[in-house]
Image (cartoon, rainbow, N blue to C red):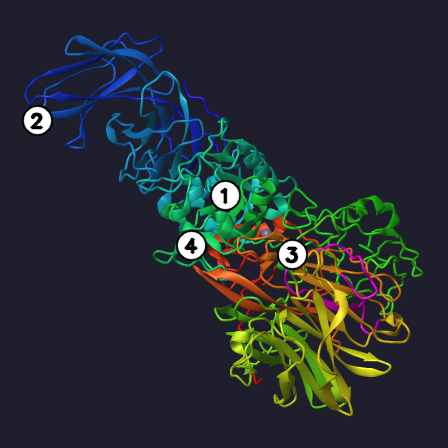
Amino acid sequence: MIRFAMVSWTMVAITLCASTSRADYGAFDGEVTYVYREYFYLQADNTYEFETRNLSPGGDTVMYLWYDQAGEQVAYNDDYEGLASRIRYTPRQSGYYLLIVRSYSNSSQGGCDIWYQGQQHQTTTFGGWHIAAGNGTGDVYETVHLLGGATDTLIFLFRDEDARLFTFDDDSGVGMAAKLDPEWQFQGRLVISTYVGGPEAVLARVLVNDKYSDQDGDGLGHAFETAICSCDDTTSQFSCYPGYGSTLNVNCAALVGTPKDTDNDGLEDGWEVVGIDDASFPQLLPMWGANPLRKDLFVEMDWNDLTGLSSQLEVSNAVQIAAIFGASQTGAALANPDGTDGVKVHLDIGHASPCTVQSDPVCTAYGTWGGASLVQEPYWTCQIDRSFHWTQQPTGNPCTTIPLDQVIHGGVWAPSYQAFAQVRHGVFHYSVLTGSGGGKGLQPGWKFWANHGAAATVSHEMGHNVDLGHYGSKEAGMANCKPHYPSIMNYYGGASGFSRKDGAWGDTALDPTDLCEADGLGLSPSQRTEMDPLTQAPFHYVIEAANDPDGNNKIGVDWNRDGTIAPGPCTSATRVRAAINSSVPPSLRSCEWSRYRTDYVIEKSTTLGLAQTPAVVHTKTPTHDRMLLFYRDGEHMHVRGSASDFNTPNLPGCSSTLEHGCGDWSATPAQLSGSCSWPDATTGPAAAPIYLSSSEARVVTVWNVPAAYSCGNSTSKLWYVVYNPGTGAVTQSGWVAGTDGVTGEPSIAGYDITSEEGLMLVFRKGDGYLWQNRMVLSGGNLSWAGAATASAWQISTSPALTSSPALYGAKLPSAMLVDNQHRLFWLVWLYNWIALDTPGLDAHQTDEKPGFAWVPNKPGSTEGRFYVAWSDRTTTNSSGHGRLMIDHTVGVGSSPLTFQYKTYLDNEWFFAPYGPALFLDPAIDDNLRVLQMFQRKDGDVPKQEMQFRPFADGRFPVAMKDNNDFLVMRTGLCVSFKGCSSQCGSNPLSPGFSCPGETDYLGQQAPPLPPQADP
Ligand SMILES: [Zn+2]
């Protein structure tokens, strides 16, 4: 009654009845029945009698008596009366003897009565699945348990010549599977039995493995691997049948990785075929769906209930995740050896699958496999390292008691993996699902966390693990929200699955610093509808057939949103610069457009302190060219310089691809305060440059000195310093008259009007007014115009002014001149932005000093934008820090300052305690730059850092392209476990790609430390 089922991944036909023929190697699926077994205690020198009677029609029993203590058969009978059996036996030693009754063959199974000492003892079935076993010294036989099949099996080995029972095993295989590794030299047969009796045959697999001819070290012999279509070396070529689909032509010389892992998914062939044995937690990978010829991704998903509700993954989400990874028409990109599509995911989520068809990947997409569990606070730890190095939880670390929601928004926690079994390391990915927040995943790596509520979010973090960034492949241009990269990895949310580069959105490389609007995505007018997504949220681009004199006839895109599509042919004059991955309200997207090439000027500081916005300026003379940062550290005011332009490749500390910030910040900052004659500050400074002549520059910096720091003052006052950036000397300093009672941080900016040139100072007082003063340049000397006076702008009546003002001043292009005078703009918070002559702008909220700057559309252009950035009060994290937002105008000059492009400066999880300093450095380029403070936890210690971002307006030189995410996964699954090991082969998208250690969730390697240089 043996039926072969065409199940799962391999099935090679053999002739069952020819038990004297040489066995084939391979993996065979069949239905297993019961070999009757029962122990009897027999006394020495007494005679015992065992019989089978009342056999069912067609039944034929063979009876054995086995003495465990001797490890051998002591009595045997096939046919005593008809096809029934009888043993009479007189033991010499007392002890337990095992009575075994099997069928004679596969076709003679049935039922019978067992008689003992002339009495009917019991009724049973008898059977066993018979397979020829050759005489292969060094062969290993073992059972593998399958979905919906036997869960405990035995293997018996009989000699054909005299039917002698040679040996048997119950549980030496993986879990409760059986395994025989006998030394023998005869023709024989294997009989596989279920552990418990019953009338039903159940599915099981038996492996006939020439293990001792294994060449690649995966535990599978050469002939065995050839039979199941996997590789044992890097040279063999053969045809085989994997048990499904059609015959495969296997070429082991063309492997992506190593023969030990034929499908290059990081899981050795032996693990996928046999499973991994462990005394307490065997990994039944074949039952859970592993296949050495297709990429498999196993994930343990633990969960917490810190939000009061369980965040265990729901079945519907598991099914969606399986569909996202299992997308059709992806087999070739993945290089699945069997040519099938998709990555098969297997999620241990603590919910059993009702489906029991081993060959259906949906049935093994999820299950309850012994790992998934609830983990609570003791399993969590805070950690700080931006490189996401997973540190040991310090003893008594109070982080472990912080409610999860308070920690994740700081972006600094990680599970400690106490709940992740050691046997699963390197086999499963590990995650803890949460009830809130988004997620983070190592890229590449095997750990992530994610909000359980959305299959897309969980899939996204799993994508990071298998080496996908928010840009797909690193070689496709490292930028989030590429408008023509429709992938779940992309924050714009334009796709529900991974990108497969089907051509619909074109294959154009888009460089935000060099865009041809007339060419758009390179699509022709007949393909216009394919570009519709660009016109919808979050981008809302205007597209139209471009009137292109060069005859390209493409659909153009107004990349820079200036209302017109610059006509072709594209030349340096008509090409535009634009942040093409920026969303448009109300479709806020966390497009991270400012973070590329972030330079971490100061890291992990405990002294940068609270309540400050730093200041940044650039001065350039024939003998001097330097960017300067003014900031408060440990209550003292400091200045630090850099001669880098932050654009040029191969500067010290800069990688050739410029993917990180880099520069030569002076190692030792100069200190500008610290005594009664140089008073300290509790807030950040304001700073602005002014040129005394073409060869002499000065920077005037101003800060708020509280009474407690001023050695005699009874109230807060502003202190100013005139700094010579060429020599580092302070040439003037002192109190600013009329500033008693100043509150918060001041602002200072240059002006140049027909009648006068100088610097304007604006600050607020508790009296409800913005106050002002001017430092006038006259005859090469700087002097205050007088005492500060209250301005006409009273702003504290109702509601109260809570933020400090930001001021912008510069020699504006002539298009912006009114009455032929350069004008000053300043912004304050009063539930509306207020700018001089331009009331009623978009409502933004902040308690901190915002940043404010004007940036031309292209170098030398008179058209440009005002940018404002602020720490937003409408959403704060548990530390009270707001999200960093940015907005900008389009069109200046006589048009009103309408801010309408509000979005996140970084991503939405980026919370900053203070407003940033915005900065245009026309001496270098026309990009918006930002200097900002950021706070994160280092263990249980809050620490601050100062970041400089030279491309804060999202116009950075990167060739943005679409890519096929499944091509990244071709090697990414292996890389997730093995890192930069050559075992994983090279990705066609990333030739020569190396991964020198774990990278952070930003998809960026930890940046090099700033090189040391003179101030
Ligand atoms: Zn992500």
Residue 548 visible here = yes
Distance, label 1 to label 2, CA atoms, is 60 Å
Distance, label 3 to label 1, CA atoms, is 28 Å
The amino acid type of the residue labelled 4 equals Cys
* Mark 3 or mark 1: whose residue is earlier in sequence: 1
Q: Position of residue 487 (x, y in %)?
A: 66, 48
> Looking at the picture, which amino acid does disc 2 mark?
Gln
Considering only order in the chain, which callout, 2 or 1, is on the residue closer to the N terminus?
2
- Discs 3/1, front: 3
Q: Give, as a single range, the part of the protein colored magenta.
A: 834-861
Q: Which mark is residue 433?
A: 1
Quadrant into which the C terminus falls: bottom right
Residue 872: mark in rendering:
3
Disc on res. 93: 2
Camera-near label (3 vs 2) is: 3
Q: Is residue 509 above or below residue 705?
A: above
Instruction: Check if mark 3's residue and mark 2's residue have beta carbons within 8 Å.
Output: no
Type of residue at label 3?
Answer: Asp
Which residue is labeled 4 in the image?
Answer: 399
The picture quadrant where one finds residue 149 is top left
**Nearer the observer, disc 4 or disc 3?**
3
Amino acid under label 1? Leu
Q: Quadrant of the N terminus?
A: top left
